[in-house]
Amino acid sequence: MEYKNRISLKLPNWDYSWAGVYFITTCTKDRNCYFGNVVNGEMILTNPGAIADVLWHEIPNHSENIELGPFIVMPNHIHGILMLKNDKDEAIDYEARKNMDVKRFQNPGKNSISSIVGGYKASVTKHLRRMGYIFAWQSGFYDEIIRDVDAYHNVKRYIENNPINWKGDEYN
């Protein structure tokens, strides 16, 4: 697999350990439906889906200054909102951050969105493989910085309605 020409969708002047609200999506490898099925607009979890659900809710026990927003496990992906709090960043607003010349490193450090999501994915993989499942995630994940209350509510509705809209979902 060749990664040299991969284009990062991350904002170049944004430090993903800064306080913020982040919408996260990550899919299973080849979009295999390990986590369950949608029946009549309701997500029915398999054992792997239940593990993915439980371990997401464990994130605040393993990461500092994090709150969880709405979350859903779908047949082959998860959607969730992570709210990263960091007292030292509260005084810096989004416009100021956007204009900073911040260098991004390969290792974003502990308590960054990448380390939190990477830890979650590793934990799910480890537990499922220990239980005898052949399981893998896609490499990487999608994130979006939620910048205002309206965007938050739109993402929240999207997450909550994901099972109802499964038939037309891009991940189905």
Image (cartoon, rainbow, N blue to C red):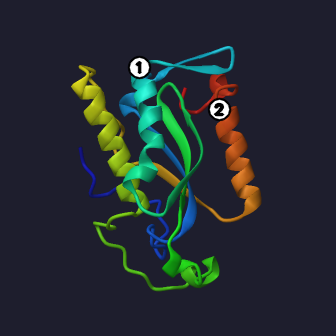
Local secondary structure at mark 2: loop
Q: Are marks 2 and 1 in contact (CB under 8 Å)?
A: no
Local secondary structure at mark 1: helix
Task: Residue 84: give x, y in percent of width and height.
Answer: 52, 63
Q: As shown in the figure, which amino acid type bears the numbered disc 1?
A: Asn
Q: Which residue is drawn at 23% across and 19% down?
A: 132
Task: Residue 70: give x, y in percent of width and height.
Answer: 62, 44
- Quadrant in which the C terminus appears: top right
Task: Residue 87: give x, y in percent of width and height.
Answer: 52, 77
Q: Which residue is drawn at 72% across and 42% down?
A: 157
Q: How many marks?
A: 2
Q: Is residue 145 left or right of residue 106?
A: right
Pointer 2: residues within 10 angstroms few (<14), some, or many (20+)? many
Q: Is residue 14 left or right of residue 128?
A: right
What is the distance, in whole Å, between disc 2 and disc 1 at their CAs?
20 Å
| Figure check: 90 above or below 150 | below
Q: In this view, does 170 lie to the left or right of 164?
A: left
| Figure check: 166 above or below 23 | above
Pointer 1: residues within 10 angstroms few (<14), some, or many (20+)? few
- Quadrant in which the N terminus appears: top left
Nearer the N terminus, badge 2 or badge 1?
Answer: 1
Q: Name the residue under label 1.
A: 47
Q: Mark 2 points at which residue?
A: 162
